[in-house]
Each structure stands twice: as C-alpha cells, then as structure tokens.
Image: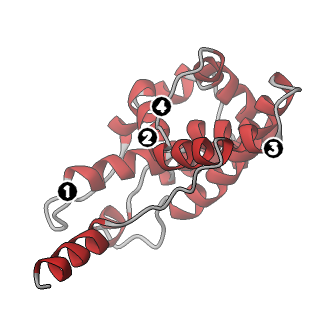
Amino acid sequence: MEELLEKFDIVANNINIYKIAFIHSSYSTTHGLSYDYERLEFLGDSVLSMVVADYIFQKYPNSGEGNLTKMRANYVCQSALIYYSKQLGLDKYTKINTEEHSMSHNEVLSISADIFESFLGAIYIDQGIEKAREYLENNIFKYIDMGKIFFYDYKSIIKEYGDAKEVPVVFLTIKHLLFKYLLMDNL
C-alpha cells in the first residue's frame, strides 16, 4: 500500500482508510470484517463527478449544458473507470474473495471501476478536495484533453439527428420486434 501512495505523492494521515478502499464485500464477509469499500465508492463517485464537471465547465466555456453533460458522462462512466483503474494499477490491490463467491469477468471489471472511485473517496477523506483534484489532474484530465472516447451513446446520436432533420425516430426493443414478427407470422 505504501508504494501505491508514494506513486501518487500521498503521505497518509490515516493509512487504514486506503486499505478499506480496496476491500470488496466478498473479502469482508469471508474475513468477518464490518467494513468494505462501498461507502468510499459512494463518496468518490460524487467527488469525481464534481471535479470533472468543474474541469470541463472551465475548459469549454462556450459549451452548453447538454454537451457538458455528455462530456462528463464519458469520463465518469464505468468503461472509463475500469480503464483508469487498470492504467493506474489500482485493480492489483483489490482484496476480493473469488473462491467462495464465483464472479463473472464483467463483475470483476465492475469492481475495478468501484475501486477507482473508492480510492478517490479515501484521498478526499484523508487529504481533502485539493489533493483529490490534484490526483485527477495528474491522472485523468489528460484523457479529457486528448478527447478520449470511452463510450458512444448511439441512441442519443440517432435521436438528435432525427430531431435536427425533423424525422420521427422510434426505438423498438428486440422483444417488441420478435412479438411483432410472431404476430404477423400467425396472420
């Protein structure tokens, strides 16, 4: 844990908060602990959203609320958090019990996203908002500056195009289409 904190130039006031940030509930349950990373994840999620929102608000003074919301969503989505966690090596510190709790690959990826937020929450609790902002500036803002795309919202793109061209856009689920197909087949 010390080398991880050193990597981010963090001198811990309370090292235990950082240890908690990496404890998954499966590990907590197996080892009889009364805590896990979830509360820190909750806090880190809000800190991340606020700091990223502030950064893009300042960086793009001519962008409207809709564009800023889309930009923020791209940099705080699960895909982005998984990417950050892997790039920073945070996922290697996760304490998880996969033996008694079988987890899919997607669940493990989701946990790495959670870890990014919980670690940020720990930084905020232990060091304050300025250190949390510095951590994000040094490790995340570069992706905003380069315009990295972590997900595409195809549905919104199609809807916006339809609105701009005054063409009605209707979305049907596969279930709806299947029902329609089966119904027409029986006619």
Residue marked by disc 3: 65
Quadrant of the drawing holding the C terminus: bottom left
Cα separation between marks 2 and 4? 9 Å
Q: Looking at numbered disc 4 in the image, what kind of residue is underneath it? A: Tyr
The numbered mark, 3 or 2, whose residue comes first in the sequence reads 3
Cα separation between marks 3 and 1? 37 Å
The picture places residue 10, in percent across and down from the top left corner, at 64, 28
Q: Quadrant of residue 142?
A: top right
Residue ID at (72%, 38%) = 67
Q: Which mark is residue 104?
A: 1
Q: Callout 2: helix, strand or loop?
A: helix
In this view, 25 is above or below 169: below
Q: Callout 3: helix, strand or loop?
A: helix
The numbered mark, 1 or 2, whose residue comes first in the sequence reads 2
Residue ID at (36%, 46%) = 94
Residue marked by disc 2: 79
Cα separation between marks 1 and 2? 16 Å
In this view, 150 is above or below 37: above
Q: Which mark is residue 84?
A: 4
Q: Looking at numbered disc 2 in the image, what kind of residue is underneath it? A: Ser
